Amino acid sequence: MMERQSSFGVVPSSKSLVSKSSVNQKGKSKSLHTISARENETSKRDPGLSKQDENYSKEILAKFDKLLAGNTDNLPHLPRSVVRIFISSTFSDMRAERNILSREVFPKLKELCLSKDLDFQVVDMRWGVTEDSQNDHSVERICLQEVENCQQMSLGPNFVAIIGDRYGFRPIPIEISEEVFETLKEFAQRITTKPHAIKLMETWYKLDENCLPSKYILQPIRSQFSFFGDYSPGCDEPRAKHTQEWENTFADLRDILKMAALFAHGAKKFTDEQLTEFNISVTEMEIKKGILEVKCPDKSVAVFHREIQGFTNYDDRMTKRHIDTSVENGMH
């Protein structure tokens, strides 16, 4: 019994899947469909060709057809020679920890990997966020894509989470289905403290009918604040003005969507999962993808929990930077 080697795996075989005469006969190449048909005829005549071979041939043909159609899902992975780790944490409260890792830990890990002929890479999104990605709201998508890249590329560990006492930045959805958006508008009218809610939602979300099904898409920041992220000479003042205006607009829009979703959930128009979409932080998104959705996280993930005790002055600026606080009836 021979073993047949291909980029899609190794299977036992009593004969080769494609003979040389099948591929090139009298100088003419044959299509994969022709080869498959010939193999099917051979399998009928030759009892030595097992059912496993037939199924394998059909699987390869199906993958080849999808590849020709532009579908690159489920392609075989290239041999791995890199340890690539995504660092997940909130930013402002974990600045010291991240800096120590970069300055003292990562160089030693790089030396260790080099001694084993491996490349060591770290993905720290503090240095991977550009003004353009902020403008088109693609930061969260880039983070999750980088988590997936590390999972696919890394030989061994690929995700490290450092958890403290902050939940992290909560974005607003980039895309909202037409049905969900109309439901949000319906309940946003009930927010008496924000009579401008509907107008603000319609300003920043536009229906894209080219999507199937149609979706409302969050518009780029520069569609309303043209100097956002503009570092051209003489633009310092308008850039600062537009940056602040966007921060105010974002906070207002986030509150509107959150309250409307809460009202819709109370009226049983939204599921728990739909409500979560308007409250989840980027850090939780990363942890879900990097840990909770992984089959064997103990082989590829490390989690460090930092707990700081002794907070007394919750109005202190440094305290607020390291712990989430809320006030209820005058008490923290």
Image (spheres, rainbow, N blue to C red):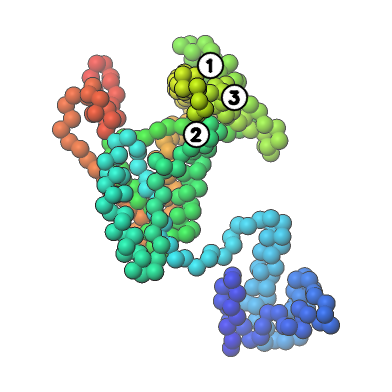
Residue 144 vertical placement versus 29 (above, below)? above
Q: Position of residue 298 (x, y in %)?
A: 35, 58
Answer with mark 2 or mark 3, whichever residue precedes in sequence.
Answer: 2
Q: Secondary structure at mark 1?
A: helix
Q: Position of residue 248 (x, y in %)?
A: 45, 19
Q: Nearer the viewer, residue 93 or 10?
A: 93
In the picture provided, is 252 more to the left or to the right than 90? right
Answer with mark 3 or mark 1, whichever residue precedes in sequence.
Answer: 1
Residue type highlighted by circle 1: Ala
Q: Nearer the viewer, residue 33 or 28?
A: 28
Residue 58 marker: none
Q: Secondary structure at mark 2?
A: helix
Q: Residue at label 1?
A: 197
Cα–Cα span, label 1 and label 2:
27 Å
Label 3 crowding class (10 Å Cα cut-off): few <14, some 14-19, many 20+?
A: few
Q: Nearer the viewer, mark 2 or mark 3?
A: 2
Cα–Cα span, label 3 and label 1:
19 Å
Residue type highlighted by circle 2: Glu
Q: Residue at label 3?
A: 223
In the picture provided, is 324 more to the left or to the right than 174? left
Q: Position of residue 21 (x, y in %)?
A: 77, 84
Cα–Cα span, label 2 and label 3:
14 Å
Q: Report the residue at 40% width, 66% height from top.
A: 118
Q: Secondary structure at mark 3?
A: helix
Q: Are marks 2 and 3 in contact (CB under 8 Å)?
A: no
Q: Report the residue at 45% width, 55% height from top.
A: 150
Q: Residue at label 2?
A: 131
